[in-house]
Image (cartoon, grey):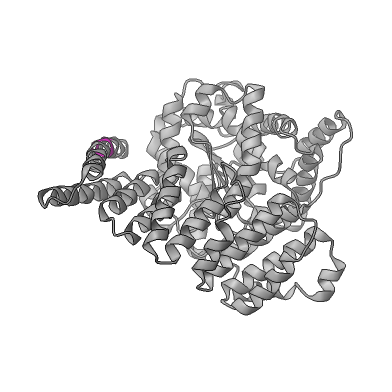
Amino acid sequence: MLSLLPPRLLQRFGVLGVCAALLLPVAPAQAQVSNNRLPNLGDGADVPLGVERRLGESIAREIYRDPDYLDDPVLGDYVQSIWQPLLASARQRGELTPELEQQFAWEVSLIRDRSINAFALPGGYLGVHLGLFSAVSSADELASVLAHELSHVTQRHIARMISQQGRQGPMVMGAMILGMLAASRSVNSSSISAGNALMVGGQAAAIQSQLNFSRDMEREADRVGYGVMTEAGYEPQGFVTMFEKLQQAARLNDNGSFPYLRSHPMTTERISDAQARQQLLPKRGAVTTTPTHAMMSARAQVLAKPGVDVLRSIAAQATPSNLAAANRPKQAGLLYGATLSEMQQRHFAVARQHLAQLQGLSGLELSAVRAVRLLAAELALASGDADQAVALLDLKATVLANNDRATRMQLARSRVGTQKPAQGKLAANELALWLSQYPRDASAWQLQASAFELQGDALRAIRAQAEARAMELDYGAAVDRFKAAQTLAHQMASEGKLDGAGHMEASIIDARLRELERLRREQALERGIN
Ligand SMILES: [Zn+2]
């Protein structure tokens, strides 16, 4: 079956700009293929964590290069606000061991795709399609999907598949997974044509039989995931309502906009398990949509690039009569969506009217107030008023939460947008603090490069660009940039333009270059292009 795969599949998918879900369907015709070789649940220990992580990195590297990979700090923070409590819960329960936590990435990527999907990759890399945000109506439902995927990783289900496929070699496995990701993308997605999707789909069908989460694995991910999410404080009801939504969608929908259903068939068995589990718990509150969730769902809809007709219809929904009939969360969602849609169409005056209405809503929770403030700054910057954007976010009186990445990124972007060297310096300093805590943040490095450029500090700008490439796992490009920085440092030193701090920077560059050259050699060995 593997002979159906072209030898340079991995590279080709990179060119197509493809990624998406680890589709692991359990259709009866395919389930028979490898089930008899399945080790017992809980196995997978024979695949070292480092091997799984490196396989994950080879896939993540392609995802970062995909034009539909989206680093949106606002939606990213929302996902993190759900993801971090789930990780803490899994840690508490003992499923996330210190070793697993340290060796894996535990990163959730956003994919600009309107289909409803979430996936787990080797090495603790996870992904969520933007379509999922609008399909779920609460953080609890989103938590139930993420907890399920998290549990596939902690229960080493992926390791077990790797050991089954071990004789194929990790690169073939990586290529197969990329093929599965490709097949899950919307056919009308911007980066993949219908013809390619069909072709990829055909290959994917052949591959699916090789990459199966078994029914038992799915049930285990449901059971463990349910424990993880409820112990993290989410409503158990969210697990059940998510299942009901998927089941209903399965009945109505067979057009590929629910790739999650292909990998997670809603068997009556899974649903009754979930219902039985929920009945064991004391009755708690119902799942409710918060203003924050409604706004994040509207944001995901707009950022999924739905086309100008959909943008217009999103904006047109915020009518006085619709608003009058809506409850507070719905109002927040309508106005947020309308503001952002008009902004994307560069109708700034209308966008400001919707924003003013949104700002006038009373009784919003703190996280919703923050989302509105960020939107105001985004609109100010987009319409050319970077100074106002800075003023909106540079609130000395507000203590910024340690993990408030969106405010930091938006503030830095706005400071750079003013084109004032003094603002560039502030941005570079603030980002340096952030990067000392989160050194793997590629977008923050890239933004820091712009801040250094604004100050005329070419050496640090090139080094920051190099770090950005390194954090995207593109070691070849990183080495090129570090070499450029080294050349510049030598030139500056020979001209007597390097001060003490400059010499320090130059020695960091030398050390990082040696490290990246080593990583690049390892990467080349893994790809077999020695
Ligand atoms: Zn699953």
Q: Check if residue 516 falls in the magenta segment.
A: yes
- Which x, y percent locates residue 386? 50, 67
Q: Is residue 52 above or below residue 15?
A: above
Q: Check if residue 67 falls in the magenta segment.
A: no
Q: Quadrant of residue 279?
A: top right
Residue 4 visible: no
In the current view of this chain or complex, which residue is farthest to the front? 397
Looking at the figure, which quarter contains the C terminus?
A: top left
Q: Residue at x 85, y 29 (%)?
A: 281
Q: Is residue 18 above or below residue 232?
A: below
Left/right placement of residue 277 relative to residue 495 reads right
- Which x, y percent locates residue 184? 56, 52
User: Which residues are the magenta region?
Assistant: 514-518
- Which x, y percent locates residue 428? 40, 52
Q: Quadrant of residue 53?
A: top left
Left/right placement of residue 59 relative to residue 97 reads left
In the current view of this chain or complex, which residue is farthest to the left? 494
- Identify the main secondary structure in magenta: helix
Q: Quadrant of residue 527?
A: top left
Query: Relative to the observer, which residue lies in front, 112 or 412?
Result: 412
Left/right placement of residue 240 relative to residue 400 reads right
- Which x, y percent locates residue 333? 73, 62
Query: Relative to the observer, which residue lies in front, 218 or 392?
Result: 392
Q: Is residue 333 above or below residue 184?
A: below
Residue 480 visible: yes
